[in-house]
Image (cartoon, coloured by chain):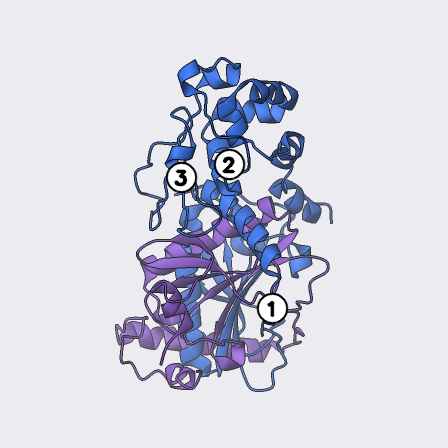
Chain colours: A blue, B purple
Amino acid sequence: MAEIKSDPQCIFCKIVKGEIPSKKILETSHCLAVLDIYPASKGHAIILPKTHAVILPQVPAEVLADMAILVKKISDLAFKSFKPAGLNVFLANGQIAGQKMPHVLVHVIPRYENDGIPMKLPENQPNTEELETVYNTLLQKTNVNLNMKFTPLGAGKTIQPSQISATTTAPASIPNQAPQAAPSSPPTIQSSSIAGSPSSSQIAQTPPQPQISEEQLHLIIENNPKLKSMLLENPAGLKEAISKTPQLQMVFAGVDIDALSKKMKGGADLDKISALFDKK
Amino acid sequence: MTCPLCQIVKKEIKALPLYEDEQIMAVMHPFPASLGHVIVFPKNHVQILTMVDDPILIKMHEVVQKISSSVFDALGSQGTNILIQNGELAGQTLAHFVINVLPRSVNDTLNFEWQPKQTPQEELDAILKSYAETQQKLIAAQSVVTPKEGDTNYMLKQLKRIP
């Protein structure tokens, strides 16, 4: 069983340890379900992991699984005990999302007529271009986070194997692939390409133009540690290598290397987000 | 009655999928409440949380967690909400169980803040007692927590009205 970390300053860690009294409904090895003492409605319960985690991404897998089942169980008990007209399960990550306490809390809120709890979602007509950009960005990250190469059919620009020379294998299109599935051969770029010495037989005849979708580019980068480290540490060197290598020119056609490098270095730091709470 | 999510599963409606396996799917919400709004749902047509099989629910949570991380990483979002709506009154619009992942930003129009109620101790104790009694009854009846198919759960009757 995973070790239970606790933060001496955190009220909910004190509840877990029994240093602060609570109205306990159920307890499992990883989680606790208690009544919210300032409820939004009758039967309002909160489910919390025993180990200290500020936001959802920090919750260990086994704790998350336990939490999911406990949320279902408490929802079932709430339905049977109070016969509400509906029920919301709500979790806020970050102050901007309405998080008040620096410990992951899942709210189970039974709903009754005219209770005034705002849980309806607006349905907005999206800007198609904006939606697709966000989609591509999210897909890349989700693939990395789930350790898979999910390339939906018909999404983004497709790449033809013939457009890419032997040294650069395009990521295969694998819908329905579970994260547990055996990994397919990752796309690789041989180090010789990066070093700028392609063999003459590999020189492509296609003129360089954007041919690879953003997620495919991302997959290629993620599967080539050398390329990734160059992109992060030596974008100028990489640009030089690209100028000498047709294969790389094809991969990076139309891509702003400096911007890409910056983007890869950036990204939200989860520790920074949780640190915002610790300062309070 | 055709369910749009079942149609997405059957590929009769086009969606932007982020994840798919035999049991679950995650797609971009076609009418997002906030930019980057993702829905994660079981392929099997079930209406509410208590009807979802445990292993599927666990997998859904794993994907929800990873997509939340993606939102933090990729969209530079400062927050996310995870929301489940069971029943029309709770905001459910489709009779197919969904977990919403909602990226939050300073400029969005979302607001889920409720009014916390000062509640007397006796009232809280009575609620706790109701929970304990229901739990006891379930144990006594050795009843399975998950309602079986064909169960005449009143929540389901209510949901049948949702188009």
Disc 3 with disc 1 on a shared chain: yes
Q: Between residues B94 and A195, which one lies in front from this camera angle? A: A195
From the top left corner, tell me how far across and down residue A224 is, in percent.
47, 26
- Using the rendered image of the protein, determine whether residue B113 is visible from the camera's viewpoint: yes
Q: Nearer the viewer, mark 2 or mark 3?
A: 3
From the top left corner, tell me how far across and down residue A118 is, in percent.
62, 75
Disc 1, SS: loop
Residue under the point 52% across and 54% down: A16
Q: Nearer the viewer, mark 3 or mark 1?
A: 3
Which quadrant is home to the C terminus of chain B?
bottom left
What residue would you read off at disc 2? A217
- Using the rendered image of the protein, determine whether residue A19 is visible from the camera's viewpoint: no
- Labelled disc at residue A125: 1
From the top left corner, tell me how far across and down residue B105 is, in percent.
68, 57
What residue would you read off at disc 3? A160
Q: Amino acid at mark 1?
A: Gln
Marks 1/2: CA–CA distance? 29 Å
Marks 3/1: CA–CA distance? 33 Å
Disc 3 and disc 1 in contact, CB within 8 angstroms: no
* Left or right: residue B109 compared with residue B131: right
Q: Between residues A252 and A13, which one lies in front from this camera angle? A: A252
Label 3 environment density (alpha carbons within 10 Å; few <14, some 14–19, many ≥20): few
Q: Amino acid at mark 2?
A: Leu
Marks 2/3: CA–CA distance? 14 Å
Residue under the point 60% across and 73% down: A39
Q: Is residue B26 above or below residue B145?
A: above
Which quadrant is home to the N terminus of chain B?
bottom left
